[in-house]
Amino acid sequence: MRAAVTSFDPPALDAPTLVADGETLRDMPEGGETISRPSVSADGALVVFAHGTHSRLTDGETSALYAARVGDPPIRLAAGVPPESETRSAWPALIDGEAMAWVVYYARDARGVRALWLSALDLARLDAGEDPSSPPFRLPGGSGQLMAPSFAAAECRVAECRSDLECCSGTCSASTWTCAP
């Protein structure tokens, strides 16, 4: 399997750019050729994805997490997963930033129990070709059925407004909009 991204900027789509090829990652500890659940940054330049034998991690299947800048080789997020889940991590979701990004994912422990984990990504280390991930922390709560984490942006409002109802719609930016607490 392969993962590729393309620009969605009007008026036309760019040609797809290959991010990862499962065949080239076959010899990694998780094995396999499946690339699943890619999560792409808002600008389309950063991708996190799972690679392994399957996308769901059931019955001995394996998967590991990778990050890549479009046009650069993928880097395994080894430091960003618990040691017992090195080849048992899947379904990554990305929230990007300028210097740091965050990835949330689920991992199975040695007993097969699912949990959600969060790891910071240092984008300067990624750009230097190093593992950008930081030691993760487990997100408390939830259940063994957790599988597909996601992020939602904070609501945005014009700085002078008391509520969203008084404001026009838009997205957060440093000068015009502020994110509500």
Image (cartoon, rainbow, N blue to C red):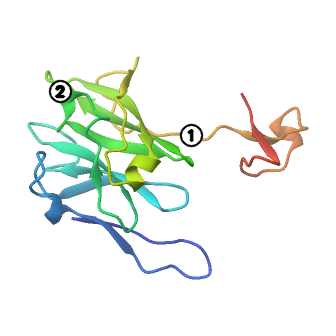
- The tag on residue 5 is none
| Nearest to viewer (mark 1 / mark 2) | 2
Res 59 → quadrant: top left
**Of all residues shown, which one is farthest toward the front?**
128
Q: Is residue 67 above or below residue 120?
A: below
Q: Residue at x 61, y 41 (%)?
A: 153
Q: Residue at x 53, y 46 (%)?
A: 99
Q: In which quarter of the image is the N terminus?
A: bottom left
Query: Which three-letter amino acid code belongs to the residue tagged 1?
Result: Ala
Residue 108: x and y in percent read 22, 29
Q: Residues within 10 Å of mark 1 (few under 14, many from 20)?
A: few
Depth check, front residue: 69 or 113: 69
Q: Say which mark, if any, is on residue 84.
A: 2
Between the C-alphas of marks 1 and 2, the distance is 29 Å
Mark 2 crowdedness (10 Å alpha carbons): few <14, some 14-19, many ≥20:
few
Q: Name the residue under label 1.
A: 152
